[in-house]
Amino acid sequence: MPTMIRLAIQKSGRLSEDSLNLIRECGISFVASSYKLKTEATNFPLEILYLRDDDIPGYVQDGVADLGIVGQNVLVEAGYPALEIQALGFSKCRLSLAVPRAAAYDSVADLQGMNIATSYPAILGKYLTERGVQANLHTISGSVEIAPSIGLAEAICDIVSSGSTLLGNGLREVETVFRSEAVLIAHENLSAEKRELLEQLLFRMQAVRRARRNKYILLNAPTASLDAVKALLPGIKSPTVTPLAEEGWVSVQSVVNEDDFWHITGQLKAVGAEGILVLPIEKMIS
Ligand code: ATP
Ligand code: MG
């Protein structure tokens, strides 16, 4: 039987959809079903396990799964930060300390001796110790933000993305303890065959991520403006330039980074570019 690599992803939650999309964009097909606990890909030797995110680091550490996709917050809290091999750029969030809106707060020293509710005692404990603060950490697994209003704690440390949950519970964010995003993790002693499969997966993931960050751009420009256009569009190597049927005009094709895109299109128009088309790129391989 040929070697298969086993990837653990979150069964249902905030990581699930982006994890499945990433695998699909890598050109790997599989039938996902909500009740099964594992599926086999049809065109790549990959088996997908659906688990609770908290269980993923331990399973990868033990080799029950070869690979996993999990938030850095859960990975570091579990005590296995060394398993991380690639940040994936989604599920970005932060772990923050918050206190009731009316509470006085100047610095982290104000937390000395307080009761703090959190699901992340390891990360928070390290953060406080490094700052010389001793507090009583109460570990609870969910609904951390209600702890102050029911008298369980004077402060909390929890995952925040927009801050609206904190606001809704009368809390205000006072410190960022940890920044997190989804990461690919791998067992430390994979066999040579599995390592080769991992390399193939990483190659595909990189092509997908580079493509997401870039756009394909096509435009028409007067030949006289070509040098100015080229200076704005370095492209991967250099832009492709083809003459138009109309004398004195060229068509230019290149790749631009999404972050620079609006800025560059404005400048392109200013030097005489017209008919600017921008297309998504599916895969990008250097
Ligand atoms: P499970 O049932 O699998 O244990 P869970 O309830 O612990 O799920 P989710 O709320 O689905 O976890 O969050 C999974 C991960 O997504 C978190 O550990 C964190 O890395 C990230 N995350 C959490 N909240 C947000 C958010 N608001 N925005 C973006 N990412 C988030
Ligand atoms: Mg969980």
Image (cartoon, rainbow, N blue to C red):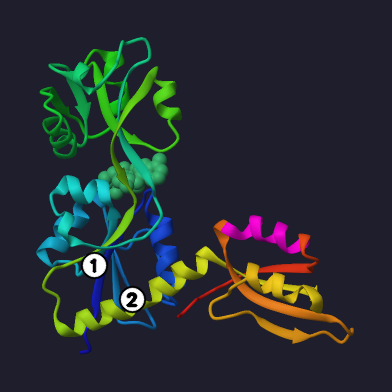
Relative to 103, is 129 on the left or the right?
left
Picture quadrant of residue 193: bottom left
Q: Residue at x 45, y 29 (%)?
A: 164
Side of 68 relative to 63 (left or right): right
Q: Are marks 2 and 1 in contact (CB under 8 Å)?
A: yes
The residue positioned 54% from the left and 73% from the top of the image is: 282
Pinpoint residue 202: horizontal percent, then vertical percent: 33, 74
Give the position of the C terminus as an image quadrant.
bottom left
Closer to the chain start, of discs 2 and 1, is 1
| Residue 160, position as x, y percentages in the image | 37, 35
Which residue is identified by label 2? Answer: 201
Q: Quadrant of residue 58?
A: bottom left
Residue 154, percent from left and from top: 23, 16
Which mark identifies residue 67? Answer: 1
Residue type for callout 2: Leu
Question: In terms of secondary structure, where does tag 1 sit?
Answer: strand
Which amino acid type is shown beneath numbered disc 1? Leu
Dominant SS type (magenta): helix
Query: Real-space Cα distance between discs 2 and 1?
Result: 11 Å
- Circle 2 Cα neighbour tier, 10 Å, few/some/many (<14 / 14–19 / ≥20): some
Q: Which residue is at the front of the view, 86 or 224?
A: 224
Q: Quadrant of residue 166?
A: top left
Q: Which residues are magenta?
A: 260-269
Q: Ligand 2 is located in which of the four quadrants?
A: top left
